[in-house]
Image: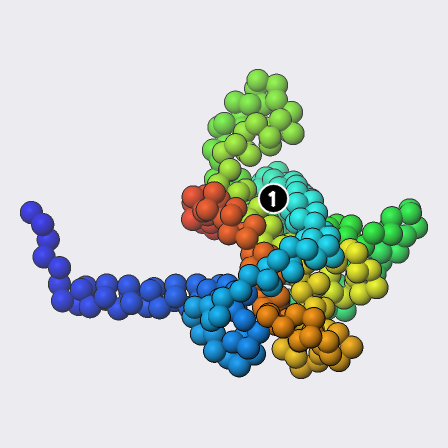
Amino acid sequence: MKRKTEVSELIFKIVAYFVLIVFALLCVYPLIYALSSAFSSSDAVNSGKVILWPVEVQGEAFVYVLKNNMFWLNYSNTLFVTFLGTIWALGYSILGAYALSKKRLLGRRGWNFFLVFTMWFSAGIIPQFTNYQNTISVFDSIGIHDLKWTVVLAMGMNATNIILLRNSFEGVPSEIEEAARIDGATEMQILTKVYLPMSKATIATVALFFGISRWNGYFWSYKVMTSQEYSWPIQVYIRDYIDKYTTISGKGDELYMGNWSDLHPNFSAISVVYSMVVCAVIPILAIYPFIQKYFAKGVNMGGVKE
């Protein structure tokens, strides 16, 4: 027999769906606005006529971006930092989480406390900046002068992700590990052939967290790569472009802005910025649907300790 829906439950569902729809629209609108501004004319963008749909449609801004070699060089830098940075951070996070999940680890409670302590109290910007500077000095001493490696190697630790992985590993039945040991498996074989396959959802989720943080990483790249433009990730390049060609940040360089309307009368520098933003978002939008199925399961497995 079908249960009759109570009035209070019906009201709750209506309010919940309304809030979710509004929240979803608020999340989607910035991307729609970026697309519309990228395809709108210079006059429409500069006068604020673009609200939802493109006004006086043009595609020259995207063509300008596609022909911008420096943009694609920095785009490749972002791919480099994201790919290697995610592998590096995920690799030693797995090793750390695996060790912390073992009750036989000497001082296990102390190590776990120190890990959680970093979530409560941050060391601040100065120690992190010192870490980057020391890493740069070490790389210089061994002949590595490309600052992309600094961001890849020095920007790796994340206590939350290690805790997610640790809790997921603790959920693996100890009987399976004991059976593997009886069969003669080494510690590394147990990790790679037992724990990792049984924690794929959490690993995929943590990889997504690391990947997005590397792809969107701006602040430290901006601070340590100031003098090395060919190593900039795309986010730093976009910010530099904004500072030079527009007044969005309150700056704007007359040397770059002066002849823009004469050279490019059909589209504005702001349309170019939005075109770059759209291009920068595409990889995340393309990858996320394939990892989404692991997301909720991975967080639940890693976030709940049995």
Residue 143 x, y percent position in the rendering = 91, 47
- Residue 125 versus residue 286: which sits nearer the camera? 286
In the picture as drawn, the residue positioned furthest to the left comes out as 1
Quarter of the figure with residue 132: bottom right
Look at 60% across and 70% down and name the residue there: 267
- Residue that appears at 47% across and 78% down: 49
> Residue 258 in the image: x percent, y percent?
73, 79
Q: Position of residue 70 (x, y in %)?
A: 74, 57
**Residue at 68% in and 55% down:** 67
Residue 79 versus residue 7: which sits nearer the camera? Answer: 79
Q: Amino acid at mark 1?
A: Ala
Observer able to see residue 52: yes
Secondary structure of the residue carrying tag 1 is helix
The residue to which callout 1 is attached is 97
Q: Split into 4 quadrants, where in the image is the C terminus? A: top left
Left or right of 23 on screen, residue 251: right
